[in-house]
Amino acid sequence: MTNWLDITLLKVGDYKLATGALLASIVVLVATFVIASLVSRAFTRVARHRHPTVAHQLYTVNRIAYYFLIVLGVIGALSVLGFQLDKLVIIGGALGIGIGLGLQSIVNNFVSGIIILLEKSIKVGDFIELESGLMGEVQEIKLRSTLIRTADNVDILIPSSEFISGHLINWTLEENIRRFRIPFGVAYGSDKTLVRDSVLKAASALPSTLNDDKHKPVVWMSGFGDSSLNFILGVWVDPVAVKRPTQVTSDYVWAIDDALRQAGVEIPFPQRDLHLRSSDIELGGAKESPTSDD
């Protein structure tokens, strides 16, 4: 058995790789991934029963601890293979040159992922909007990328550097409620008080509407359009509705249209007045000018 473990698989200069060392390094790597997974699951179970703020902090610690254990395991496996730490430093310096030349984007995403975890500018469960217009809920934050799920249930991996270098709208960073502004218009001459009361009643009837002392729906008159009096409905919605902006907008527009029709308020369509000036040309033919005889 001893002779089998001492079989030389590779020999380069003074370095010799034996079967036993290779198997030991594999055991170290497997044990590292198992321990890291168990620790990660333990953090996840604890976070489920904590306040959301504490849960987000545990998630950050979980990700950092997971990758820290992986790095320790890799270093341990290399040590078992016979690599000395001082040589690893030299190799790391050489890799640093290579990283600087050809792996800048990977390192950029890696560092950006660490910044995101530490700053907590994005958390799992947040609803975000990127500069490109992409909107979705954060499902997982990794060091290199972040997993976002759109309203159409499409999973998209976004490089972490985009969250640091680009503009980002986090709809649920501090609070998980939001006010939507729904524009609409009515015909000139409509009873403005009736319009306001009808729309507020329709908005309050929707289950997603918040209607407490600090978050009441309101109707503003925003101006005079070409063919309508313009209004805006400002309404606060619950956390579930915040993550469904298209559906929420549709629900309120639908309710406003029904309410105004029931109240007998006309919803105008664009109109233009056409003014015709008289000329020598009449419809149906040309008007002949009088001529004089010689």
Image (cartoon, helix red, strand yellow):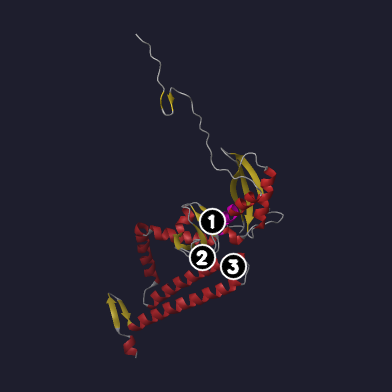
Q: Which residue is mark 2?
A: 139
Where the C terminus falls, by quadrant?
Answer: top left
Judge the density around disc 1: few (<14), some (14-19), many (≥20) Cα neighbours within 10 Å: few
Judge the density around disc 3: few (<14), some (14-19), many (≥20) Cα neighbours within 10 Å: many
Query: Tag 3: residue type?
Result: Ala
- The single residue placed furthest to the front in the displayed view is 293
* Residue 51, picture quadrant: bottom right
Mark 2 vs mark 3: give the one in front: 2
Q: Which residue is mark 3?
A: 55
Query: Tag 2: residue type?
Result: Gln
Q: Which residues are magenta?
A: 243-253
In depth, the one of 155 and 60 nearer the eye is: 155
* Callout 2: SS: strand
Q: Are marks 1 and 3 in contact (CB under 8 Å)?
A: no
Query: Tag 1: residue type?
Result: Thr
Q: Position of residue 64 (x, y in %)?
A: 51, 67
Q: Which residue is mark 1?
A: 246
Mark 2 vs mark 1: give the one in front: 1
* Mark earlier in primary sequence (1, 3): 3
- The single residue placed furthest to the right in the displayed view is 213
